[in-house]
Image (spheres, helix red, strand yellow):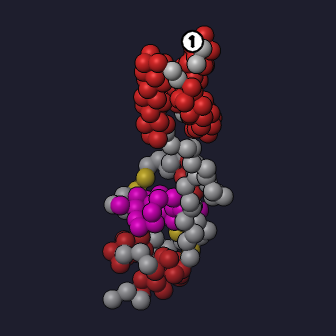
Amino acid sequence: MEPNKFRESRQSINRMCEQIDQLIEKKAVEESKACFEEVNGELDALRPQAEGEIQKRSVKNLGMKINALSGKLSKLKAKRKTASRSGSGGKSMIEWDEERIAGLSDVFLKKMFANMADDKASQVFLGTTGKGIRPNYRIKFGDERIAGFTGSGHKPQEPLPASGGKHLSQPFSYETIEAIVSKLS
């Protein structure tokens, strides 16, 4: 290939490699992949046209540069798209019902029920974030007083977390929790 045309092609490929490197730094996955495909095509077109030792070595060096970019590109991860989930930053929300509450550990249920303090007008609201194993919960007593408790130690939360109110289930009555606890062994 005529040396000036070869140099122009080589410089074009080098500029594209720099552009890919910048896109990788910006974590622009799709754009960098598209540019990578284009630069690969350019190198494949240049390879058979290389004449002489210098041009062949230059094509080989460009190939090594592109392979290095391929390694960087493979480490890039596409941004995860959040599915149609409600609530906190893409995390799925727990839907509490009587069956799911009954699936909580016996010890957890007994301590939660004990925190309801024999107030037959009380209601419990369970946290809808996390794994649903030991959820934080709030109890609204008959006198309208609200107390929050940690799920892991059943310790009172003072003061109540400001953001916690929007991540609570519908209320479950004292009678509902009493019926679930009474079925325990």
User: Is 56 left or right of 26, judged from the image as shown?
Assistant: left
Secondary structure type for disc 1: helix
Find residue 148 and report its horizontal and vertical position in percent.
Answer: 47, 57
Magenta-tinted stretch = 126-152
Residue 167 falls inside the magenta stretch: no
Residue at 52% across, 65% down = 126
Residue at 57% across, 48% down = 80
Residue at 44% across, 78% down = 103
Give whichever of 117, 135 is nearer the camera. Answer: 135
**What residue did someone put label 1 on?**
3
Give whichever of 66, 91 is nearer the camera. Answer: 66
Residue lying farthest to the top in this orientation: 4
Find residue 14 and report its horizontal and vertical position in percent.
Answer: 54, 19
Q: Is residue 68 above or below residue 153?
A: above
Residue lying farthest to the right in this orientation: 84
Tell me if residue 96 can be seen.
Answer: yes
